Amino acid sequence: MTSVWVKVFVLPVLLILASYFLDNVQFGAFWQPLLVAAVLILVGVPMENRWLRKGNLISGVLMDVISAFFIIWGLSNMFNTASVTFTGAFLISCVIGLCELVLHKYLLSNDQPAPVSD
């Protein structure tokens, strides 16, 4: 549950700040980065629960970065009034990856990833 709350607060803030401070990230409406953040949360939390395990930190973060890149770039370019370039999506996904690295280290140190039965 910690992961969900962190993502709910961090992802929208990162996307909104990127829209204000990066020239290659422009959202035409306030709801657009919120929708992108919601999709990132809906994809990221189950992916985290499934794949985050001790010894799997870097590959988990790498999967988060790759999925965040495609979600941000693809979904943002579906909006008529938004413009997110390849570089902008890459920069945002790398920042999200750094945040995810810190979050994953915290979750692993506190044994919080949800157990998944195979």
Image (cartoon, grey):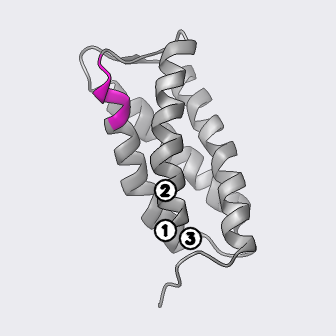
- Pick whichever, 39 or 5, lies toward us: 5
Can you see residue 62?
A: yes
Q: Which mark is residue 5?
A: 2
Q: Which residues are magenta?
A: 29-34
Upstream in the sequence, badge 1 or badge 3?
Answer: 1
**CA distance separating discs 1 and 3:** 16 Å
**Taking 112 as reference, is 62 above or below it?**
above
The residue pinned by badge 3 equals 51
Local packing at callout 3 (Cα closer than 10 Å; few below 14, some 14-19, many 20+) is: some
Where's residue 95, x and y in %? Answer: 64, 36
Q: Residue at point 33% right, 24% down? A: 77
Asked which secondary structure carries label 1, the reply is: loop
- Residue type at the position of mark 1: Met
**CA distance separating discs 3 and 2:** 19 Å
The residue pinned by badge 1 equals 1
- Pick whichever, 20 or 36, lies toward us: 20
Closer mark to the observer between disc 1 and disc 3: 1
- Residue type at the position of mark 2: Trp
User: Is 30 one of the magenta-colored residues?
Assistant: yes
Where's residue 20, x and y in %? Answer: 51, 14
**CA distance separating discs 1 and 2:** 7 Å
**Taking 94 as reference, is 26 above or below it?**
above
Local packing at callout 1 (Cα closer than 10 Å; few below 14, some 14-19, many 20+) is: few
- Residue type at the position of mark 3: Trp
Q: Is residue 55 left or right of residue 64?
A: right
Asked which secondary structure carries label 3, the reply is: helix
Q: Residue at point 54% right, 64% down? A: 2
Asked which secondary structure carries label 2, the reply is: helix
Q: Which mark is residue 16?
A: none
- Pick whichever, 14 or 69, lies toward us: 14
Q: Residue at point 50% right, 50% down? A: 7
